[in-house]
Amino acid sequence: MDPEELLAQVATLLWGLAEGAVTPLASALDLPVLAGETDPALSGKLLEPLANLPDQHSLLKLVHDLVGNISDAGSPLRAHGWKRSDGTRGLAFVLTKNGSRGVLAVSPGPVIDLVVTPNAVLDHSVIGAEWDLTVSIRTDNAWTATFTPGAAAAAPAGTVSLTVGKRALAVGAGGLGISTQRVAATLVASPATAAHVDIHVEKFTARLLPAILAGLLGGSGAETSPTDLTLAMSRTEGLRFAEGRVRVERRINLQLPGISVRSFAVALAMVDGKFVLQPSVSVLAKPPALPMSASLDEVGIGIPILLPDRIGIGTDIVADLPSGMGIDLLLGPVSGGGFFKRRGANAYAGGLDINLGVLHVTAFGLLQLPGNNNNPPLSLLVLLGAEFPYPGIQLGFGFAIDAVGGLVGINRRADADHLRALVSEGNADRILFPGNAIARADEIVGALESCFPVAPGRFVVGPMVRINWGGRMVSVAVAVILELPDPVRVLLLGRALIALPDPAVPLIRLQASVYGKIDPGVPVVEFLVSLAGSWIVGIPVTGEIYLLFRGGDNAVFVLSAGGFHPKYTRPPGVPQLARLAMDIGGGVLGLRAESYLALTSNSLQFGAKLQLDATVAECGLEGWLGLDALFVWEPTLAFQAHVYAGVAVLAFGERLAGIGLDFTLEGPAPWHAYGKGSIEVLFWEVSLDFDVRWGDPAPLAQSTEDIFDHVAKAVRQRDAWAVERPGAQRAGIKFTETAKRELAQGIVAQPDASLRVSQSVVPLDIAINRFHRLGVPEQTWRITSAHLDAGLELPRTIPVPEQFVPGEYFAMNDDEQLGRGAFEKRTGGFALSNTAVKPGPAHVMDDRYETGYKVEPGWFPAPPAPRIILRLRGSFTAETFARMITAAERVDRWRLAQRPFENLVPKVVMNR
């Protein structure tokens, strides 16, 4: 917890303690004003002394323990009544010495008033059997201040020091508990120093292991060696230990044989609204006569500080479960171990790595217990793996299965971004059959938590297998991860490793980590291959290969090995890719070679760079040579090649001499060459800029195709027309199987359905200047009208989007070719409304179940005469109504059902 937040919560408890102590004293504080008081700050506020200070509250009892009965007339410290200007009565402690007075008053609210008379020199000490008190106050002028919860700090007008000490404090007996030699709290404030409290704990010891656990480890007790602690409390830095944190570690020893202490810590925390002191210890233990060793992390106790009901330390000590536990088995042929860790609130992780001789088993689990109101919900993730000893299960031709496993998650989902990042970093083996699992437990558990977070209602299943060839020289591990239910996603995680001549001491190690994603709902197909962790005879080899095909609203196609052209704007969701690179050399000579090749729907990109670094202490030689090339084929074939090279001599980081060239060639038709060359020697530099153009622009090829013929052919296709059912099933009708089939085939239609027409030849309602990648006069195509054979016009309503390649219809410059999407959604058609169709008037009729209905003469428009399709009516052989409807409404529905869909042939008029 943050120290400032901890102080705020503890301050709330302390204010509650003061409120609880003074509020019940209202009747006892109904005293007259102290006669003869002349100090302006006290006149009318300070009341008569109390005859006896009650001690029913723990804070008042503490005052009794500190200073005795302060109602004695001869005592320099007296208890008085106090009356604030608003009439509220409180309790005041008045220290009087050498003609000076200091008053500390506590009133319900709570409110604390401090009043010190001018030129005060006040010193007071009390030494008791268990407690001691020391007070020192100095001020030149009058000092008055008021304190309330949440109010801004008042600047001190004097100096005050207050120390309260308690000797021989112990909590707990025989089992868990703590003890100290002395605890002292000191309050200090002055004009030069902001108010702060330091709490010194001397000779702090703790018994942290339950007796049964201590006996298992070979001893009868587990008391830590004494250590000193200091807590600091201030408005600016919160409540913390003197080291600046709410948790502090110490070097200590435990009085148990076979125990090796890893760390001892004391923490401050708020648990269920209580301020708690939490000492804990982490140990390594070897129980006698047991073939195992164990590690315990942060096993300890929680000691509540009793606020605000009373002040003190609670005796209800709570034993905290270890935050982590590990076990190593030493059973001869069977070896291995496991671990268990607490991961945040109600979250736990565990792992197992055991070699059974005939099988090597690895398992990891994540458990999240449900929180308040089942948020977060109960979730579980299990990763299992079983590895077979060499040579594995033989498949023939040198192939063998050497490991199988799987992953199951309940209320978990697969995070594609984290899985992709895991592959980019070359860490796919944290999930795919991790080796040395217990030693790498933290990174494996961290990868599982980030890649498979909690997600209510989602489930993850992922079978895994690993196959080798040639006796471990080639190894391929694959996991197919399914995320269920709808929308279903398929993720692929793989790792291919080639190690020559032997994996134990490879001269060549090529590792390819693979991430794949298939999401049919978008749809999207994505693959990423990373070479991180590869080398050839000590030369690192890095780089990434990426493939993306995505449909839907943000359609795009990308294939890249090593990244993209510097001017290319990556589409949304495409990651930054590492160049294919090799680092050659070492010591004073470094040579790095990198390259890339990319193909998109609009361009071809490739490039390479060679960089030399031969320097010692920033003195030596550096050089570079690079190429970036870009080919585009819209609106015509064009390319751009950028070549840059140079060499420089360095002395202590400064360039003494150098030569450089930066050259760009664009073309063809016209050709354009521009760039800069430079020569630099000491303070002398010569540069040459050039910009040359030649040749005529290539004529833009014009399309000779008749666009109308293509559009007309597309509109005549059966697939261009569709009947769209209403958003909700409003007719309470149960269809027969025949009716369902004919509705699906479009032979008949529901009466409240609408007609839709769409094509993907040209985008509608937008100007185009290209067709089939050739130029055309600028033109705009649109649907101007649609009508039936009966003469009924159907107005267009909602646009129907289709996917179009922008390069097919719009002329684009180089920047648009690189940055514009591969596909765009444009209008390809419209829904045609049938709201103009009106049913005939209703009439009284016999409304019996499964009754045939007769259409009124003249209801259908003429000419032509309607052709009633009787099989349509016959398909509706049974009626079930979800609600009560009137006979007239039913008649209207059946009238509309008689409309012969086949006879209403639509006509669409299009123009440009």
Image (spheres, rainbow, N blue to C red):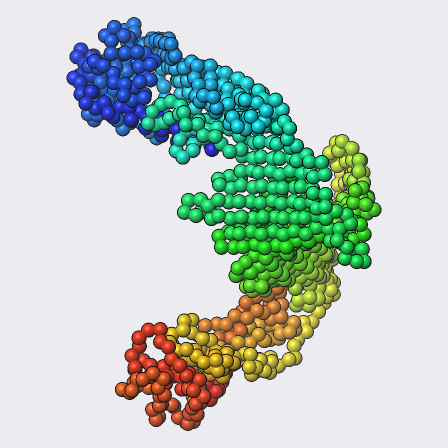
Q: Is residue 414 above or below residue 694?
A: above
In the image, residue 283 lies at what x, y percent? 59, 28
Which residue is located at x 61 percent, y 60 percent? 518
Q: Residue furthest front?
A: 289
Q: In which image quadrant can residue 701 be found?
A: bottom right
Front in this rendered view, residue 144 or 433: 433
Q: Is residue 664 left or right of residue 32?
A: right
In the image, residue 221 lies at what x, y percent? 53, 22
Which residue is located at x 69 percent, y 42 percent? 355
Q: Is residue 186 left or right of residue 546?
A: left
In the image, residue 285 lies at what x, y percent? 61, 28
Front in this rendered view, residue 738 or 537: 738
Q: Residue furthest right?
A: 501
Q: Is residue 306 above or below residue 672?
A: above
Q: Is residue 132 above or below residue 82?
A: above
Total tally of numbered discs in the picture: 0
Front in this rendered view, residue 301 or 799: 301
Front in this rendered view, residue 488 or 342: 342
Which residue is located at x 31 percent, y 77 percent? 885
Q: Is residue 292 visible?
A: yes
Which residue is located at x 59 percent, y 24 percent? 218
In the image, residue 908 lies at what x, y percent? 50, 83
Q: Is residue 117 visible?
A: no
Q: In which image quadrant can residue 444 be found?
A: top right
